[in-house]
Amino acid sequence: KIQNELIKIANHNPIAFESLLLAYLGSGSDSSKIEQDVVSDAESTPYFLSGKDIGLDDKNRLLIKAIISRYREKEAILSSETLVQILEHHRVEILAKEQEIMRWVEDSLPQVEEPVIQLSEQGKLPIPKDVIKERFANLQFKILDEMIATLDEKWGDFCVEIHCVRLSTGIPTDKRLHVLAHEIFHALSGQIEYTQAHYNHPEDPNRNQNSIIKTGVSFYDKNKRTIHGAHPVTLSWLNEALTEEAVSKVVGIAVSYEDERNLLKLLVGAGIPEDILYSAYFENYGHDQPKGNHRLPKTKKLFEVTNKRFGVGFLMNLDNLIRILGNGDTLKGTAVLMETMNRENLKKIFGDNTTPTLVKTFNR
């Protein structure tokens, strides 16, 4: 079973596999067993067998290259004894890393919470101070081994159902604060239903949950999945762009979702007010609204404004185009859109107040 998992990791996350082997070999551990396993595999034919006198670092690099290549070919060449030694070393190391990151998170939370409260008090973020404090107080954190983590994003994600930020042990030190702030903004963004984490836990047999999930301006039905097993998320590009722009107000710089942010800038530049976008982003579903009132009036306002500016169905048509261009991958789809559409075409889409050019393009 472990060998099969390593084969999967070698094919889907080879960098993590490389880190596992590099950490073991670089720790001063005896590498003779690994060398023996590789040498006994005729197909590996590592260069260090040529008889040349090479340094330890080069030998380790060639060993790692040979091992990963064979596992990617679905050939498990490491013996059980060798695996036990490697994984025991990894277990001890990763436990220490998880504890170190968790301590860092606890120490770093004020660096995110305090600026967010200041922005709220200055009227620059439409989220009340009491809501910010409640969300921070109830927020959970989990540190996951990068070898086996199944995160929505490379270094972290936010699980809305249990109000939990999950971070990978593989986050580079200089990226930690940015990733932490990004996932916390997802936690602060509007939701269909927000309560304390234990009340919303998906494993609670007494909890009858709504299948529709809202985070920010994104929606998805957790009972529906694509053929690849992912949830089809509506307006994911816009949600990530708004999240990252908010992060830049806290940590001073935006470093991810560049294409999404550039698309957002076109939207704002064409006359869609930023305050309307963020009002929808931070809006929670209004369970207590009087009968007959819209449960998400600020989100409704966003669609009304964009429909008036660009034509009926603009945001959803744009979202569908991105999904098509990326074959279901909105990150790829946004990149393709921004790469293939030149400046003049983008001006036509976002700069014409009378003709819903993009809608006509879809219809063709």
Image (cartoon, rainbow, N blue to C red):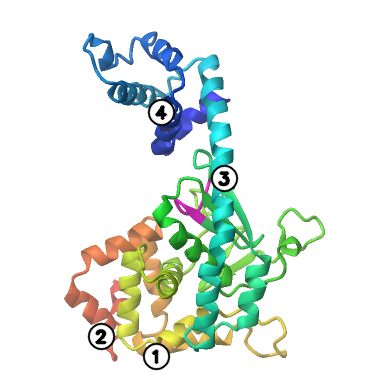
**Location of mark 3 (residue):** 98
Does 116 sit above or below residue 27?
below
* Label 3 residue SS: helix
Which of the marked residues, 4 or 3, is nearer the chain's N terminus? 4
Alpha carbon distance from label 1 to label 4: 61 Å
Q: What span is colored magenta in the figure?
A: 150-156
x%, y% of residue 153?
A: 46, 54
Amino acid type for the residue under numbered disc 2? Gly
Nearer the N terminus, badge 1 or badge 4? 4
The relative height of residue 248 versus residue 26 in the rendered view (above or below) is below
Residue placed under numbered mark 2 in the picture:
351
Which comes before the other along the chain, label 2 or label 3?
3
Could you say where residue 145 lies in the image, as x and y percent from the top left?
54, 42
Closer to the camera in the image, 96 or 204: 96
Tell me the CA gap for discs 2 and 1.
13 Å
Secondary structure under the numbered disc 1 in the rendered image = helix
Q: Earlier in the sequence, mark 2 or mark 1?
A: 1
- Give the residue at x 46% y 28%: 7
Between circles 4 and 2, the one closer to the viewer is: 4
151 falls in the magenta region: yes
Q: Say few, some or many: other residues with alpha carbon within 10 Å of mark 2 (under 14 / 14 to 19 / 20 or more).
A: many
**Residue type marked 3:** Glu
Quadrant assignment for the C terminus: bottom left
Q: What label does residue 308 carry, if any?
A: 1
Contact, mark 1 vs mark 3 (Cβ under 8 Å):
no
- Disc sitting over residue 242 in the figure: none
Which mark's residue is nearer the viewer, 2 or 3? 3
Check whether the beta carbons of the residues at disc 2 and disc 1 lie within 8 A of each other: no
- The percent position of residue 287, horizontal first and vertical second, equals 70, 81
Q: Mark 1–mark 4 contact, CB under 8 Å?
A: no
